[in-house]
Amino acid sequence: MVYRHLDQGRTSFQTIKVEPRASGEKLSTKFHFESKTRAIFSGDSAGAFMYANYKGRHDLWQQLLEEEPYDFDSPTLDVASGSGVSLMKVCAQKRARKDKNQLVCNVYAIDNYSRDKERKSRMKKIINNIRCENFVDLVTLNSADLTQLPYESDVFSLVTSPWAFKSYDKVTQRQILREMARVCKPGGYIIITDLKLSSKGPLEQWIQDMGWEEVNKKGAGPCGWFGYWSTECYKFQKPYDDNDRHSVITSTTTSTIPPSLVYDTDASSSLFRGDTDRSSLFTESDADTIHVSIR
């Protein structure tokens, strides 16, 4: 059981069902540009910025996921997925195991895709990328308030987040981190990448305040040099004796996510449709349908 029950807090969330890639359909991966404004002000570092955007960040996540014998067979979670930079690498690990006839659980990807226009654009990109790489059978894609994750506690063997904390204030960052800690199962790992100069909160200190001792922080090197802005990588392991005492208690008020995200286009038919699987990992809550049509 991955989703939380109503008596544990009412959480509004949405599930996006992505249709498989059609036979002969031509697609290419599309990832969000980390920041066009930063590129303009990078000056002599523009080359490093472009490398990090187009190749480095993907190589970095490949390296991070190979550092430990992570449990990719169990359910994993990608938080603030954006267009899916880290998600694609986790999916590749799961696909390699599934191709060897191993029993592999899904990776759950979640972001607040209704938050603003940029997030909605990233939702279209992540849907495209999941279909392009034929990972539809491996991914459950959700939209929700990241400070109130709709999942049970102690569920995911690996929780990842790519360059997302920089978008939130310090209070929200800490709430998201504590929710990531809550849903991570004992012995599991949290991996986060974020821009050093944009990080508003001391992530390693917050995780240590929860009683977690296995804390690792390092620079990403050229793979994460977005011009003058460097990337820091965090890896935390949840103690086996953690009893969820540090987790945020989910509010009983329903979040403000709208009931649907509908994109009206000139597409002759719907490539993507919304659906909800109440038997999966979510809280039994206000699970709404998302219908998405892409040109």
Image (cartoon, rainbow, N blue to C red):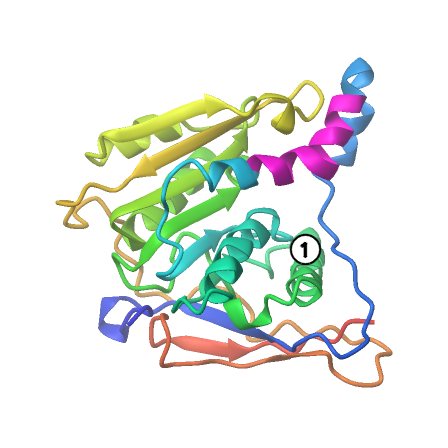
Residue under pointer 1: 122
Label 1: which secondary element: helix
The residue sitting at 81% across, 14% down in the picture is 44
* Main secondary-structure element of the magenta-colored stretch: helix
Extent of the magenta region: 47-60
* Horizontal side of residue 115 vs 247, given as left or right: right
- Identify the image quadrant of residue 103: bottom left
Label 1 is placed on what type of residue? Arg
Q: Position of residue 169 (x, y in %)?
A: 49, 36
Q: Position of residue 151 (x, y in %)?
A: 34, 64
* Relative vertical location of residue 201 with respect to residue 238 in this rendering, above or below: above
The residue sitting at 19% across, 50% down in the picture is 244
- Identify the image quadrant of residue 105: bottom left
- Identify the image quadrant of residue 72: bottom left
Quadrant location, the C terminus: bottom right
Query: Residue most toward the front?
Result: 100
Q: Position of residue 167 (x, y in %)?
A: 57, 39
Magenta span includes 36: no
Category of crowding for the residue at label 1, using alpha-carbon neighbours closer than 10 angstroms: few (below 14), some (14–19), many (at least 20): many
In this orientation, does residue 163 appear? no
Query: Residue most toward the top?
Result: 44
Image mark count: 1
Q: Position of residue 139 (x, y in %)?
A: 52, 66
Q: Nearer the viewer, residue 135 or 233?
A: 135
Quadrant location, the N terminus: bottom left
The residue sitting at 16% across, 47% down in the picture is 245
* Relative vertical location of residue 212 with respect to residue 282 in this rendering, above or below: above
The residue sitting at 33% across, 56% down in the picture is 156
In this orientation, does residue 220 appear? yes
